[in-house]
Amino acid sequence: MKLKSLQNSQPLSLRRNFSWTFVGNIVYAGCQWGMLVVLAKLGTPEMVGRFTLGLAVTAPIILFSNLNLRAVQATDAKQQYSFGDYLALRLITIVLAVAVIVGLTFAGGYSGETALVILVIGLAKGIESISDVFYGLLQQRERMDRIAKSMIFKGLLSLIALGSGVFLTKSVIWGAVSLALVWLLILIIYDLPISSQLLGINNLQACLTLVGESWKMRSPWQRFDIKILKELLWLTLPLGFVMMLISLNTNIPRYFIERYLGERELGIFAAIAYLQVVGMTVVMALGQSATPRLAKYYGSGNRSLFQSLLLKLIGVGVILGAVGVLLALVAGREILTILYRPEYAQYSNLFVGVMVAAGIGYIGSCLNCGITATRAFKRFTIPYLLLTLLTTGISWLLIPNFGLVGAVWTLCITSTAGCLTPIFILIKTQ
């Protein structure tokens, strides 16, 4: 029994971690995209736009509150903080984030079904954030197989739940409610128990002490140390701010589309733009698997291995980007017709531009894994703040005047700037 427990806690190889992460991310991203397809097939572009707006409004707030703790956990090679510290901080910040979302929804003038969708998605994202801190523990221990299984369960059940909710009620609200319930279910029946087993905790009552001293199984309040939480907060606050800025860089064009063009155009743009996630799934799988290894190489001063692994990641990003652009050029209209509806196919020219931006973005995501591994979080803030200001300015200039074509131009420009930003940070950290 002890031998089995020991084997279950051993890190997997980089190849096996990538394989599991790739499969998990492919299934999860496919199901996330499937939800947009379901909305497009069963509903209207306005419904897709409303759902997308809910994600766009809540994402920057949730990502800021997350403080990118998962990445910090994964790169905490010296185990400076216990899992209980990470979990306690996440629980505090997510409560504050949901409260901010409630306030922003009413202050922003959203009403009716749109407001309810934003609120429900905010709650669902809060639940997902709790699972994310468990993923951080598993990633730190290089057990991406368990994360992948959670993502597969979550993705498939989410697609079924959202589709059923929309089909039965003809309302995106109940689809979002079903989504939140599924994420809560997965957290309780899988993420919490499987992570607890990794820490040597085998029952639900003991699981609850994870907020406390996870390693020594002391009382939770003995480890709920305000001083330590403040220290961890100040360490991760710049990274949380950067993650919010990165999210804003993605969503600011969508705010302008909704404001100047309407929910229908936002729904069409979001459906087309989401196709770039296919390549991003591969990039993220590689990045999540490689980040702990990159952190070890960087921390030990082995710059040659660090640079070699990072260049391999970038090479994959380049190949994926080229394939995406080629597919959009050759079969863009057919792809949009099959996946969504014929009305989406008339925007095939936008699809090509989106995939160009996606290819550039894949390279930027690989570079972001590199700068995260350096843990030089304080260097991230100013460059990404400037990038956000650039995105806002370009969106303001192009989208009201050129519509969805201007939105695609905005993506290309900001993706290029998003590649240059981590390069600049990496040069500064060497």
Image (cartoon, rainbow, N blue to C red):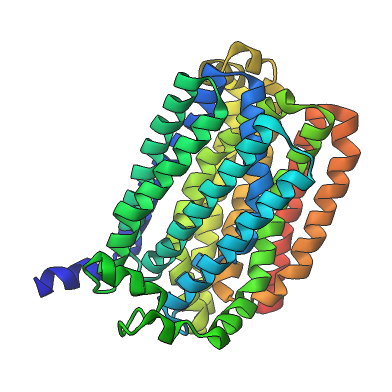
The residue at the far left in this view is: 1
Residue 183 horizontal/vertical position (percent): 42, 46
Q: Quadrant of the N terminus?
A: bottom left
145, 279: nearer the viewer: 145
Q: Residue at x 67, y 23 (%)?
A: 46
Q: Quadrant of the C terminus?
A: bottom right
Q: Is residue 34 above or below residue 337?
A: below
The residue at the far top in this view is: 342
Determine which quarter of the picture holds residue 254. top right
Q: Residue at x 46, y 70 (%)?
A: 87
Determine which quarter of the picture holds residue 327. top right
Q: Residue at x 61, y 33 (%)?
A: 51
Residue 351 horizontal/vertical position (percent): 66, 28
Side of 391 where 332 appears, left or right: left
Residue 278 horizontal/vertical position (percent): 51, 38
Q: Is residue 282 above or below residue 38?
A: below
Residue 103 horizontal/vertical position (percent): 71, 52
Determine which quarter of the picture holds residue 147. bottom left
